[in-house]
Image: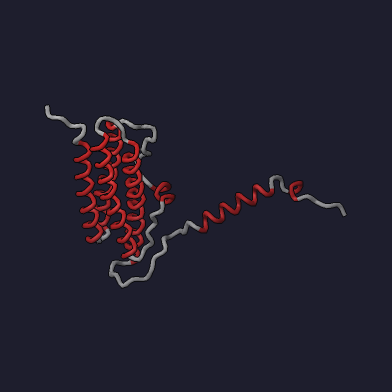
């Protein structure tokens, strides 16, 4: 009996197997409903599931924002270098604390904080940070845009948390929103002059 080559029967067999394996891994790692742990927290599980999704979205935005601040910190150049370099690092430190607050709140409600860089890259609603800028004014503009977007999303989260009857999450995002507005003020002050 002649030997049958699998590639003659199914063209590109190894390539197709590789694609199927990738698809199966992707589906296996993407559950339809977020996993929730049992907790004695008295917020209904259905609301906690919604809050988990909402806060993981904000967590992705916050992780992205944090890395955008580091991108600006590392790459800023020009006559105002030292002031902007230090300012962007301070913003990064503040955003790092917001990342931690958000992630811990997810876990407090029985969820899983999905704070990897890859998760953030897939979910973030922030605009892509321009990698080709160096000038301080360009970085100020990009950082202000990122802070403004994140601030808007934080305020939307306050409203949604209120609708889900979670005053603690609403309060957390009120704190985050106030902080973001302060940093936006500090950054935008570099472009505002008296008239």
Residue in front for this viewpoint, 58 or 33: 58
Residue for point 30% across, 35% down: 139
Residue for point 36% across, 55% down: 56
Q: Position of residue 158 (x, y in %)?
A: 24, 53
Identify the image quadrant of the C terminus. top left
Q: Position of residue 79 (x, y in %)?
A: 25, 30
Q: Position of residue 1 (x, y in %)?
A: 87, 55
Residue in front for this viewpoint, 19 or 93: 93
**12 sits left or right of 97 in the view:** right
**50 sits left or right of 188 in the view:** right
Q: How many marks?
A: 0
Above or below: residue 153 compared with residue 36: above
Residue that sits furthest to the top in the current view: 195
Q: Position of residue 166 (x, y in %)?
A: 25, 61
Above or below: residue 150 compared with residue 39: above
Above or below: residue 164 compared with residue 125: below
- The answer to which quarter of the image holds residue 102 is bottom left
Residue for point 52% across, 56% down: 27
**11 sits left or right of 137 in the view:** right
Residue that sits furthest to the right in the current view: 1
């Amino acid at each position: 009996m002649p030997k049958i080559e699998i590639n003659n029967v199914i063209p590109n067999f190894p390539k197709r197997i590789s694609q199927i394996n990738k698809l199966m891994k992707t589906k296996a790692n993407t559950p339809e409903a977020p996993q929730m742990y049992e907790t004695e927290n008295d917020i209904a599980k259905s609301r906690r599931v919604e809050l988990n999704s909402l806060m993981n979205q904000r967590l992705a935005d916050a992780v992205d924002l944090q890395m955008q601040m580091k991108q600006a910190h590392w790459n800023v150049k020009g006559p105002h270098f030292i002031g902007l370099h230090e300012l962007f690092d301070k913003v990064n430190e503040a955003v790092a604390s917001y990342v931690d607050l958000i992630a811990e709140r997810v876990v407090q409600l029985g969820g899983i904080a999905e704070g990897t860089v890859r998760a953030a890259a897939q979910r973030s609603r922030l605009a892509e940070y321009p990698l080709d800028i160096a000038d301080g004014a360009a970085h100020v503009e990009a950082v202000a845009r990122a802070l403004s977007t994140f601030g808007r999303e934080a305020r939307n989260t306050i409203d949604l948390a209120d609708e889900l009857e979670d005053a603690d999450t609403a309060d957390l995002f009120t704190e985050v929103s106030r902080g973001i507005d302060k940093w936006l003020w500090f950054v935008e002050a570099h472009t505002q002059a008296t008239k």
